[in-house]
Image: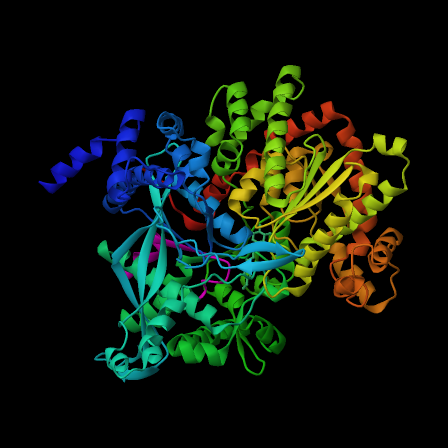
Amino acid sequence: KIVGLWEKCAVNENDDKENFQRSFVRHVTTTLARSVYNIDNFSAYQATAHTVRDQLIKRWNDTQQSHTEADPKRVYYLSLEFLLGRSLDNALLNLGLKENFGEGVKDLGFRMEDILDEEVDAALGNGGLGRLAACYMDSLASLDYPAWGYGLRYTYGIFQQRLKDGYQVEFPDYWLNFDNPWELPRLDVVVDIQFGGSVNKYTDEDGRVRHVWEGNDVIKAVAYDVPIPGYGTKNCINIRLWSSKPKRQFDLGRFNEGQYEQAVQEQMQAENITAVLYPNDNHMVGKELRLKQQYFWVAASLHDIVRRFKKSEKPWSKFPDQVAIQLNDTHPTLAIVELQRILVDLEGLDWDEAWNIVTRTFAFTNHTILPEAMEKWPVPMVAYLLPRHMQIIFDVNLFFLQNVEKLFPDDRDILAKLSIIEEATPQFVRMAHLAIVGSHQVNGVAELHSNLIKTTIFKDFVKFYGSEKFTNVTNGITPRRWLHQANPKLGDLITEVIGSKDWLKDLSSLSKLEKFADDKEFKKQWVTVKRSNKVRLAEYIKTHTGVVVNPNALFDIQVKRIHEYKRQFMNILSVIHRYNSLKKMSSEERCEVVKRVVIFGGKAAPGYYIAKLVIKLINSVAEVVNKDESIEDTLKVVFIPDYNVSVAEIIIPASDISQHISTAGTEASGTSNMKFVLNGGLILGTVDGANIEIHEEIGDDNIFMFGNLADQVEDLRHAHRYRNVPIDPALQEVINDIESGHFGDSRIFSPLINTLTIGKDYYLISDDFGSYLSAQNLVDEAYKNQDDWTRKSILCTARMGKFSSDRAIIEYANRIWNAKPCSA
Ligand code: 26W
């Protein structure tokens, strides 16, 4: 009877305007318990969100049911970060409801833009790696792969950034303050996770030595499900986020004795585990709580994955045919050890049989070669929190090194280099080594990066395994969010001119735009769209910084996490150089120059002193430049505070040029470079990461590349270290200018200047400065020819097909996971 009723309900879709409005009113009055006489934008947002959510739940259920019946091989994407941003607009567009619902809310006296603007970002990530996970979930859903994401439900996402006197200050991001309609608490999906305690040995009835781990601290993991709708499919997949809860409620005995603090302590410690996202990007900080987060998350996720596998009653040997687990960097590496523990200790498999299953299940993506980002955990810390896992790691290492020794007898050196254990005091567990040994494939995220990992950080593993274990999957971005949603006017124009919406599912069909690159009428429309996006950004800048910028100027943008290797410092130094040149000009000469608005945005890790000084310098320069009337509006500098996914959606469509200027070999891929070019922005970049492949696709004429190459970096650094390399003269002038106090008390900036001098210029700013300035001049020259610039802009978009995350996901599915689509 229930099933019959449910099927009847299921028919009642609310996808037309009237049904939507009925559902809207019902949610206002019942879900929100508000009066229909007093509906503000926030309530309108909630009611709209709940209406969409009803549809998501239905699709989610249908998808799960069909997967349970077909029982295909599942893909599990383990990521400690999912940087989803807002969900309402994305869901409306992916479900094809935007138009009807837009009219529906308008009728009721609301504007859809205002409603969308009420949503707070889900900012459960730092930068590239977290946003990549979100793009991949969109592609997995859109391509009908039977996939799950697993992560943590942080109570606090990445901090909010505000500026005070030009300095970054951090504020907590309590994003769950109001109800979150995009998560479904699964209070019935609860897993006990243990920590600490000891390992007991016993001999089983077959005479084998077995181990039981008895933890002394148990915490509950509660599942919260976030539905991810595909575009142009009924498929709706799931990200399961775990939240920590105490096993027991507070100690009433202590409470009654008046020991209030102790009474709630245990509860608070449990809830601590998923309280906050670590705000470090590309920098390892060895905090015990972070290790607890990692184990808590992988243990809960594996429990869930194993439970689902067991439902099908297949033998363990079939596990790798049913399950593919992708490790998003080394953060989930303990999953390898946990699966081995489950198979050996709990399921009673032989070590070798279990290890064979484990290594056929996992694959590992590396996202960085920066040495300071490599995860390593002190052995005593691992042994204390996870005693059985530490034993297993030592055994895995022993068997691995025995094999290494067989292949390289008498080579002590290679044993030390490959070992999972770093022999220091104390010893450390090298997570990347463990991830490689426990996986069947290891990939980098762009061609250059994948080659570099084979020749630098993992070169000794290539000697042992051969190079087939190492592969490349160049990153991608979802065109649904980064064009359709962020730039609706450009999306509509493209659809109109190529006569279909196919590009949303097959980005290579953007190549049909090529033949319009010289079409006068089309170019006019293209320029109109860009101009309106620039006006929108100019308004945003005015509201959020108070600076008035001219939408006719060239918009030059660098938005990304603030890090020395990304060289925002070099950018602001070149801005000072430009400012000084402008000041030296006569007003006639100034009339000829291309007006520029240089826009920065991005967060610095709270403990990253030098990165925070870069923000201060940008703001100090902005203050001087923006109020200097003598240069008129030939140059403006802005720092947009609190850069996040929804701010990116406003910034990216408005760029003329964006900067991706990392020291060659340091940026594994970069993904914002792809977003800018997809939106018809040109790029100024170094020969690094995915810039190289973008260059290959769009051609020499449509990109500005400069700087030393990755294979020159080592020699250049060596020269700085051991010889007196003179600083680039133009750069020296800029340094002198800062030191003269032109941008405020110069003592503030000396630690920053010192990175170039006593710090031996590790990121090679001086070495690239000359070619950077030349490339900047080429940008100015090119922008003077607006007609040709527009042609370049169109060709950029037209040639971006490769960088869809759909292409990347299909590569993972075919070459790494051996997984097939399975539609509901
Ligand atoms: C342990 C501390 C820590 C935290 C985060 C180390 C490393 C990370 C991430 C892997 C950093 C990150 O986001 N890397 C970026 O990954 C993107 C997606 O592949 C790439 O496009 C960027 O180039 C890379 O910096």
> How many discs appear?
0
In this view, 86 is above or below 436: above
Residue 445 location, x and y as percent? 56, 50
In this view, 201 is above or below 109: below
**What sort of colour scheme is used for the picture?**
rainbow
Residue 464 shown left or right of residue 754 in the figure? left
Rendered-image quarter of ligand 1: bottom right
Residue 75 location, x and y as percent? 38, 50
Q: Is residue 504 visible?
A: yes
Q: Is residue 756 visible?
A: no
In this view, 725 is above or below 341: above
Residue 598 shown left or right of residue 468 in the figure? right
Residue 437 location, x and y as percent? 49, 65
Please name the residue shown 49% across and 78% down the image.
379
In the figure, residue 632 lies in which quadrant? top right
Residue 327 lies within the magenta run? yes
Numbered range of the magenta stretch: 316-334
Q: Quadrant of the C terminus?
A: top left
User: Nearest the camera: 250 or 753?
Assistant: 250
User: Nearest the camera: 69 or 271?
Assistant: 271
Residue 792 location, x and y as percent? 69, 29
Please name the residue shown 13% across and 40% down the image.
3
Q: Quadrant of the N terminus?
A: top left
Q: In the current view of this chain or complex, which residue is farthest to the front? A: 37
In this view, 63 is above or below 721: above
Residue 686 lies within the magenta run? no
